[in-house]
Amino acid sequence: MPRLSLLAATITVVLAVGAPPSAGAGDDGMPDWSLPALGASVLVPFDAPEHDYAAGHRGIDIGPVDGPILAPADGVVAFAGTVVDRGVVSIDHGGGWVTSVEPIDPSVSVGEVVAAGDRIGTISEGGHALPGSLHVGVRRDGRYVNPLLLLGRVPRAVLLPCC
């Protein structure tokens, strides 16, 4: 363990602010993504859990939402229905990327192809998000990631060798 600690201590971390992806998917396979509600801002940030079963906030809550909910990127509707007490829409963007939004009253069906900006529903009630706000989760290959990474708003850590 001391060797690992020493190695970690000698790695230099450089933060580089990522630019929003260009049209379509970028070289890194990230979809061209935008918030699914116009004029909304982040109310509750992403809080990565320490492990798969730990507490955390596996997405962001955005608001206020007072218009239609829009597809954040091109894709295919993978789920549109009720989970426990709220409506959920999940869109598969390809390349392992999936976005889910809730609570929503869906206006799309499973298998429907959507383009970025297409209406997918309206705000509903239920879940943990405050009334008038929307929970947005993004998964890459089944693991939750911070949705703001797709907007270029989170600095990406780049590890460089030291010395």
Image (cartoon, helix red, strand yellow):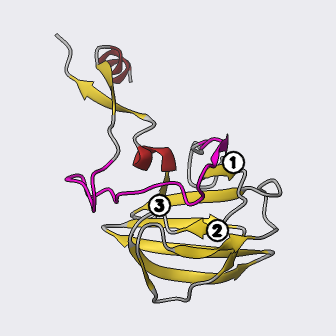
Which comes before the other along the chain, label 2 or label 3? 2
> Which of disc 2 and disc 1 is earlier in sequence?
1
- Residue 42: image location, x then y, percent: 63, 43
Whether residue 85 appears in magenta in the rendering, the answer is: no
Name the kind of residue labelled 1 in the image: Ala
Answer left or right for 1 relative to 146.
left
Where is mark 2, residue-wise? 68
Q: Is residue 148 above or below residue 66?
A: above
Residue drawn 53% across the image and 54% down it: 35
Query: Can residue 146 be seen from the camera position used here?
Result: no
Give the Cα separation between the discs numbered 1 and 2. Answer: 30 Å
The amino acid sitting under disc 3 is Arg
Which residue is denoted by mark 1 in the rendering? 55
Task: Quadrant for residue 103, please give it.
Answer: bottom right
Q: Quadrant of the N terminus?
A: top left
Residue hosting label 3:
139
Q: Residue at x 27, y 52 (%)?
A: 22
Q: Which mark is residue 104?
A: none
Q: Residue furthest top?
A: 163
